[in-house]
Amino acid sequence: MPKVIWSEAIQPLIKKYKGRNHPLEYENIYQFLVLVVLSAQSNDKLINSVAPALFKAFPTMESLSRADAETLYSYISKVIGFRKKGEWLISIAQQVKEDGNIPLTMKGLTALPGIGRKSANVIMREAGVPAEGVIVDLHVLRVAARLGITSSDDPKVVEQDLMKKINPADWGEAGMAISFLGRDTCRPTDPHHAECVMNTVCQYYAKLKGKKIKPVKKQPAGSKKKK
Ligand code: SF4
């Protein structure tokens, strides 16, 4: 397969998903940050289901900073790891104090408890600030390896590979677009290659096609098959 220029090859995928709403339903960056912290190792549907009552009780960072832990837990008790996540949220709120103080930089966000590079990249993309990295969630880990952008399964290395091969101006959209492709099309067990916008550059699909169309060598007439 010829060498792929990923900064160009990724463009149809970015175009396909540009502007698509994040599956977490939120009204402002305060809400989004809270939902991102809660969503680690959980599914977005469950997190969306707890959001309305949670934000009715704690509509701002300031109200969350004054939360009593047990009261907060009662709103998020269906979420995996809710005690630890609740502690993180109260600590974040006490540090940040107001919605307008949420730090929208990689350094500022990752200094907060419960927020790593992936979460920071997601929050910065939704906030519309320039990306400082590429979102690498479980979908991106799987799809980037299948595409052939990386050969690693270490999120830090995968992010570095993506940052090297994609233009900085596209970092924010590219990560989310790869994640959406993983959710919609490049599923773990039944990837829909035929309808995938990346199927002309995808290493995994190229290998699969190679296997399918590999000609079967004909046995010369009169030769015996090996047993
Ligand atoms: S062509 Fe198939 S394996 Fe490759 S990214 Fe698309 S769905 Fe995934």
Image (cartoon, rainbow, N blue to C red):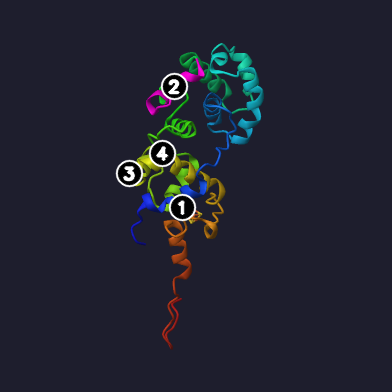
Of the numbered discs 2 and 1, the one sitting upstream in the chain is 1
Residue positioned 66% across, 30% down in the render = 49
- Magenta residues, as a range? 98-109
In three-dimensional space, the C-alpha distance between marks 1 and 4, rounded to whole angstroms, equals: 17 Å
SS of the residue under disc 1 = helix
* Residues under numbered marks 2 and 1 in contact, where contact means CB atoms less than 8 Å apart: no
Reading the image, the residue beneath label 1 is 12
In three-dimensional space, the C-alpha distance between marks 3 and 4, rounded to whole angstroms, equals: 10 Å
Q: Is residue 94 above or below residue 118?
A: above
Measured from the top left, where is residue 85 in percent x and y? Answer: 54, 23
Q: Residues within 10 Å of mark 1 (few under 14, many from 20)?
A: few
Res 28 quadrant in image: top right
Residue positioned 51% across, 56% down in the render = 196
SS of the residue under disc 4 = loop
For residue 68: magenta? no
Reading the image, the residue beneath label 2 is 112
Res 159 quadrant in image: top left
Circle number at residue 134: 4
Q: Residues within 10 Å of mark 4 (few under 14, many from 20)?
A: many
In three-dimensional space, the C-alpha distance between marks 3 and 1, rounded to whole angstroms, equals: 19 Å
Measured from the top left, where is residue 100 in percent x and y? Answer: 48, 19
Amino acid type shown at disc 3? Lys
SS of the residue under disc 3 = helix
Viewer-proximal residue, 160 or 189? 160
